[in-house]
Image (tube, rainbow, N blue to C red):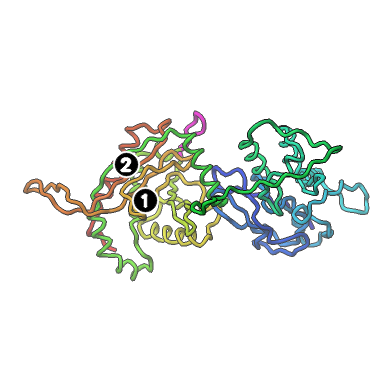
Amino acid sequence: MAQVELIMPKMGESIMEATILRWVKQVGDRVEADETILEIATDKVDSEVPSPVSGTIAQLFFKENDVVPIGKVIAVIATEGEVVKPTPSVAETPAAVPAPSSNGNGATQTPAQVAVAASVEKVSSSSGRFYSPLVRTIAQKEQISMTELDHIAGSGAQGRVTKKDILEYVQNRSGAPAAPAQPQTPQPAAPKATPAVSISGEVEIVEMDRMRKLIADHMVMSKHTSPHVTSFVEVDVTNMVKWREKNKKAFLDKYGENITYTPIFIEAVVKAIRDFPNINISLDGTRIIRKKYINIGMATALPSGNLIVPVIKNADQLNLLGLTKQVNELANRARNNQLKPDEIQDGTFTMTNVGTFGNVMGTPIINQPQVAIMAIGAIRKKPAVVETEYGDLIAVRQMMFLSLSYDHRIVDGFLGGSFLRKVGDYLEAFDSNMPV
């Protein structure tokens, strides 16, 4: 007998907004608890938002392709006993939302509901194209006439101009603003801007997809935020390689899990973080935030070519088997676009395996707001000097490079270099006789 507000959920530590990709349910539709209401996307993951209760969708406050801040009310669900009027929602029509009724016979909208509805009300130009109040406000501030506004290519639903479209237009705009349209002497409409094409046919121009644009913004932001320094060490992982080659079939038979090198690397990183806890921090202005938990993010390549970073929570509380299960499950869920929002947030340290692509080393970009990220290079057989009781010998060993990029505002060379060397020490000390 009540109405429940559905808010835009927090999708990660540094995520402040999300894009509505698709409304699965519309006004008047029945929804069960935990049933998907809409699909949303951030720069890190696409996800589904479930219903917190069973009931009927009473109102939707935003349209598909709208960018919504976290914490905003995006829908209202009427629980059992509530009467849902068949009034159109913002997601269904661009028509203005009626003013709140004071009639005692009808339901009265709350001020909050009116404010939300008003904020997304659409206004049309003489050409019949609809613009949100926000877009019109930006246009007025930047002295963009309605005629000029009508010629901006829109990426929203039905070609509508979004906030991002008009801001990109303003950024790329050259010359003086167009003069306001003169209704007395209408001019023929100018052709709409079209994407650049290659006349010779030897060049293909492809627009970035949504995730690639967001990843690009995140990488640029990280470089602007943190002065990056990268250290390298070369590590002899012969014992680790021998153990895995000898035991991978037995491990699979006993536990039903494929053992890769990733959980072994994570185990070494966790041990080194315990020795150097100041790697497991973040920086908020001049405040150092020390994390008492160790959550390891592992960069995972997607079929699209993009990367996502699922997070193994409380990795310091898991043994090698537990880490293996988490690594395999999260990697599989990532590749099938099945990660949940809480599986990509709250990471305290990130690893990326550039060796997967045959690279021997890399200089990764820090995953903000963390202060360090480690890249794992390819394992290669190389001649190396081995110290024995009989003197130094040259032998074929399994060698690899580790690199650590760190935020030089808070992590100096001593801490970054010592931590990285400690990770290498743990890998070199791996017990090749450890039982499965």
Residue at figure coordinates x 60%, y 43% from the top left:
16
Q: Secondary structure at mark 1?
A: helix
- Residue 420 bears which disc, if any? 2
**Residue nearest the observer in this picture, 172 or 330:** 172
Quadrant of residue 21 within the rendered picture: bottom right
- Residue 354 bears which disc, if any? 1
Q: Secondary structure at mark 2?
A: helix
- Furthest residue to the front? 200
Residue 81 placement, left or right of 11: right
Give the class, few, some or many, for how many residues have Cα within 10 Å of label 2's Cα (few <14, many ≥20): many
Quadrant of residue 71 within the rendered picture: top right
Residue at figure coordinates x 54%, y 44% from the top left:
13
**Amino acid type at image mark 2:** Leu
In the image, residue 420 sits, relative to residue 4, either above or below, namely: above
In the image, residue 109 sits, relative to residue 303, either above or below, namely: above
Q: Are marks 1 and 2 in contact (CB under 8 Å)?
A: no
**Residue nearest the observer in this picture, 53 or 73:** 73
Residue 409 position in % (x across, y down): 43, 30
- Furthest residue to the top? 286
What span is colored magenta in the figure?
282-290
**Amino acid type at image mark 1:** Val
Q: CA distance from mark 1 to mark 2?
A: 16 Å
Residue 180 position in % (x across, y down): 78, 34
